[in-house]
Amino acid sequence: MSYNPSNYWLHTVQMPAGTPGALPERVDVAIVGAGFTGLSAARILAKRGASVAVLETNTIGWGASSRNGGMVLTGMKLGVETLSSRYGMDVTKRMYAASLASINLVEHIVGEEKIDCNFSRCGHLEVACKQSHFDTYARSVEVIAREFNHHLRIVPRSELRSEIGSNIYYGGMVDDVSAGVNPASYVAGLGRAALKAGACISENTRVEHIERGSRNGASGFHLVTSRGSLFAENVFIATSGYTSNTTPALRKKIIPIGSFIIATERLPEALAHELSPRNRMIYDSKHYLYYYRLTPDNRMLFGGRAAFFPEASNTIQRSAEILRRGMIGVYPQLRDTKVEYAWGGTLDFCFDTMPHAGLMDGMYYAVGYAGHGVAMATYLGAKIAEQIRGGPEENPYAKIPFPGAPLGLYNGRPWFLPFAGAYYKVLDWIS
Ligand SMILES: Cc1cc2nc3c(=O)[nH]c(=O)nc-3n(C[C@H](O)[C@H](O)[C@H](O)COP(=O)(O)OP(=O)(O)OC[C@H]3O[C@@H](n4cnc5c(N)ncnc54)[C@H](O)[C@@H]3O)c2cc1C
């Protein structure tokens, strides 16, 4: 079967145009990348009176920010038990609190900037693919309630039909605090808010080289771009899975991994309700997981890391077929439903599967969202913006170690992805 490689979300939104004309000669802050991270930072910095230029190779929201599942999730990619054994309970508490604060921040921005993006606190549902996975839920719920005063709910298999119209799972775990959003509308709204606050957003402007320098006695950075040069006192790298050799030290710390999504034709109301009676953001318990949800116009949007390599027309076609089969495995009701859209995007994983935000080579950065970036990118963008304006270094990821590849065997080209993919498939099989 052949699929139309097209991002459904982009058909629902009018992206704002960037700032026309030449680049400014000098700014207080240059931000590389116009996704959630960069635009959230630009909005705050411009509101605080700083001169800001956001420099974007493509267009506003072109990267993962307009391509994702729109799941605004509590918690982090790694479970709290892994986190507490690695960093201790105090640091884990701060990380968990940041994950909840990040959703509040998205909700606040959507309200304050009047962004029409279907933000809704619909909650999320994690479903267990094996009995052994379900057995771990009780302990997670207990630890999260005790240590973080946050309450999730276990749904036994016998009651799962109230949450999902599928028979294949062993039970579930619900968090009512998570939310859903149309990510393209949200990133468009963030872009409009940053422009309104006075930020310059330069589209089709690839940053090619950055080096330390000074101008009129002020120290900072000279940036060479595809559309001319500028001087900035501060630089914030917000390039996520699309980080390139413009920042080689950062690139070596990030593994770009493809994630892919299909969206069906619109479903009849009754069928949509049967598949997801509470309209949750849903994902399963595997390493090689599926994530899925209804769109506001009742399509089934179904995603997963079907191919590990980043998006290209061949990986999209291959992934779309894998995802369609996966979707029918979960929902046999969709066997004859047409898939109308298929697209992909690049996730940014760090070697420890953690977000990282701070200073490297004198430049600020925030990366490593590992598929949990809608809220966290918004949050870390804002936190780094406050830090640039002289605020405290407040994010819980600033002080944790930021590992590179084991033995340094990585130059930014992820040659090991097929092995990693095979490894996770085996893990899913045996665990
Ligand atoms: C398919 C998919 C599904 C996902 N689903 C979810 C989900 O449901 N929930 C969730 O929380 N997260 C999800 N994520 C992750 C989330 O989308 C990202 O973490 C988040 O969008 C990262 O935002 P960002 O602004 O840091 O990066 P991006 O939005 O990727 O923006 C980076 C930008 O930097 C630009 N750039 C790169 N290099 C340069 C340069 N040298 N000069 C100028 N510009 C440059 C790129 O063009 C790009 O536009 C998903 C991601 C993908 C790909």
Image: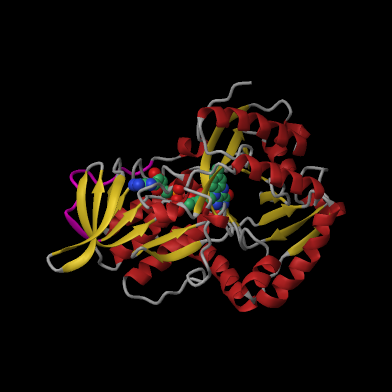
Q: What residue is at 44 percent from the left and 60 percent from the top?
A: 366
Quarter of the figure with the N terminus: top right
Could you say which is closer to the camera, residue 253 or residue 52? 253
Residue ranking furthest to the right? 158
Dominant SS in magenta? loop
Residue lying farthest to the left in this orientation: 216
Q: Residue at x 60, y 35 (%)?
A: 262
Position of 99 compared to 379: left or right?
right
**Residue 40 against residue 325 in the figure, above or below:** below
In this rendering, would 109 be left or right of 93? Answer: left
**In this figure, which colouring scheme has been used for the structure?**
secondary structure
> Is 26 within the magenta?
yes
Which residue of the protein is positioned furthest toward the front in this rendering?
407
Side of 285 relative to 391 (left or right): right
Quarter residue 264 falls in: top right
Horizontal and vertical percent position of residue 129: 79, 48
Residue at the image position 33 percent from the left and 69 percent from the top:
388
> Is any part of residue 40 visible from this angle?
yes
- State which region is magenta: 15-28
Q: Pick out the residue farthest to the top.
A: 1
